[in-house]
Amino acid sequence: MKNISKELMGASAIPIILSVLQSGDSYGYEIVQKVKDLGKDKIQWNEPSIYPVLKKLESSGMIKSYWKVLEGERPRKYYTLLADGKEQLKQNMAEWDIVYAIFGKLKTELS
């Protein structure tokens, strides 16, 4: 299977990032790595491509950032999911469920 298209990744970036943050606070590189691992390297994200999305989510009050320094490491900007982000994620999941259902029906009809 080919890598997932940039268009589809763009459309799914917000719910994916919110989903990652639902499981716990994370920093940019860690978010990218989690998504790559879950996508079995079919998803070609890099750190610079998610920062505009993280900034948008933060400015809209869905996530909040903070700096954290672990012993012997450089400071990292972590992101945490806020209540508005949890609500947005619920809405996004419901929307994606509709899309999946449509694809499922179409796939059955075409088989």
Image (cartoon, rainbow, N blue to C red):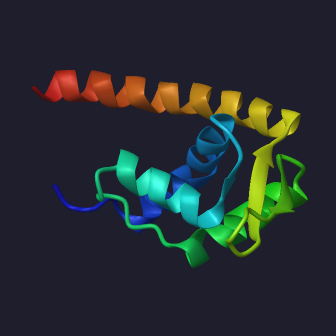
Query: Looking at the image, which is closer to me, 87 or 38?
Result: 38
Left or right for 89, reference 33: right
Q: Nearer the viewer, residue 17 or 9?
A: 17
Which image quadrant for residue 107?
A: top left
Q: Position of residue 36 (x, y in %)?
A: 39, 56
The answer to which quarter of the image holds residue 29 is bottom right
- Residue shown at the point (85%, 39%) measured from the top left: 82
- Residue 12 placement (x, y as % from top left): 53, 50
Quadrant holding the C terminus: top left
Q: Position of residue 15 (x, y in %)?
A: 61, 43
Seen as rendered, the residue at the extreme front is: 72
Seen at 77% across and 66% down, the residue is: 77
- Residue 79 shown left or right of residue 23 in the figure: right
Total residue callouts: 0
- Of all residues shown, which one is farthest toward the left? 111
Q: Is residue 77 left or right of residue 44?
A: right
Q: Which quarter of the figure is the N terminus placed in?
A: bottom left
